Image: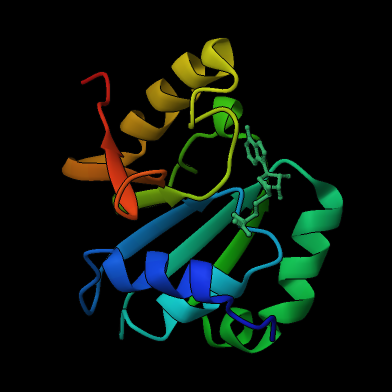
């Protein structure tokens, strides 16, 4: 289990979480925020994606218990390439913290990433990132 810093704790506290929801975290290594989210969405699920193989291995190690119980899963993929598996339900909420493709540092990647994320969300699904108070919502192409 990876410790949750005060910075990430404030982010998780601000997420509009509810039991049963499906959450997507982008760039979530080493898994600390995802584990805290998993504990707050009883009966729901969080998928964490990360483009770093090392990051994915960290999440698998740190969140082994949540993975074993089915509350959390991990996938090695960049947001720009992400798509739902054929049998996978869409997500109610997506969030990312300190991920350059979404916080404006890499605008080209950001366009592709927002398109992929929008396609993986329910019609009412939202994308929240850091850099607000403490979160801000990003517009999605629909
Ligand atoms: C600065 S770290 C932040 C980690 C964590 N969100 C936090 O705030 O502590 C950025 C993470 O996002 C991942 N990442 C960066 N760009 C990504 C992208 N386009 N798609 C998926 N993961 C990405 C990196 O591999 C890394 O694990």
> Is 16 located above or below residue 92 in the figure?
below
Q: Position of residue 87 (x, y in %)?
A: 42, 50
Residue 108 position within the rendered picture, expressed as x and y whole percent measured from the top left: 55, 10
Q: Tell me what residue is drawn at x 26 percent, y 18 percent.
A: 141
Is 103 left, or right, of 89 in this rendering?
right
Q: Residue furthest top?
A: 108
Q: Give the quarter of the figure containing the N terminus.
A: bottom right
What residue is drawn where x is 45% and y is 75%?
9
* 138 versus 47 height, above or below: above
Inspect this view and state whether residue 90 appears: no
Residue 124 screen position, x and y as percent = 13, 43
Q: Is residue 21 left or right of residue 10?
A: left
Q: Position of residue 6 (x, y in %)?
A: 51, 76
Q: Nearer the viewer, residue 98 or 81?
A: 98
Q: Quadrant of residue 129?
A: top left
Can you say which quadrant of the picture contains the C terminus? Answer: top left
- Relative to residue 61, is residue 15 drawn left or right? left
- The relative height of residue 102 versus residue 110 in the rendered view (above or below) is below
Q: Is residue 62 visible?
A: yes
Residue at (56, 34) in percent of width and height? 79
Decide if residue 63 is on the left or right side of residue 116.
right
- Residue ID at (39%, 70%): 10
């Amino acid at each position: 289990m990876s410790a949750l810093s005060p910075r990430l704790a404030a982010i998780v506290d601000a997420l509009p979480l509810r039991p049963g929801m499906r959450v997507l975290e982008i760039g979530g290594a080493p898994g600390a925020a995802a584990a805290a989210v998993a504990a707050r969405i009883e009966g729901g699920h969080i998928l964490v994606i990360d483009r770093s193989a090392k990051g994915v291995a960290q999440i698998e190690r740190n969140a082994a218990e949540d993975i074993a119980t089915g509350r959390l899963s991990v996938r090695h993929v960049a947001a720009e390439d992400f798509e739902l598996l054929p049998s996978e339900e869409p997500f109610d909420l997506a969030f990312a913290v300190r991920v350059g493709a979404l916080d404006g540092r890499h605008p080209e990647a950001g366009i592709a990433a927002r398109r992929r994320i929008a396609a993986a969300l329910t019609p009412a699904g939202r994308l929240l990132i850091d850099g607000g108070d403490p979160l801000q919502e990003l517009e999605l192409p629909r």
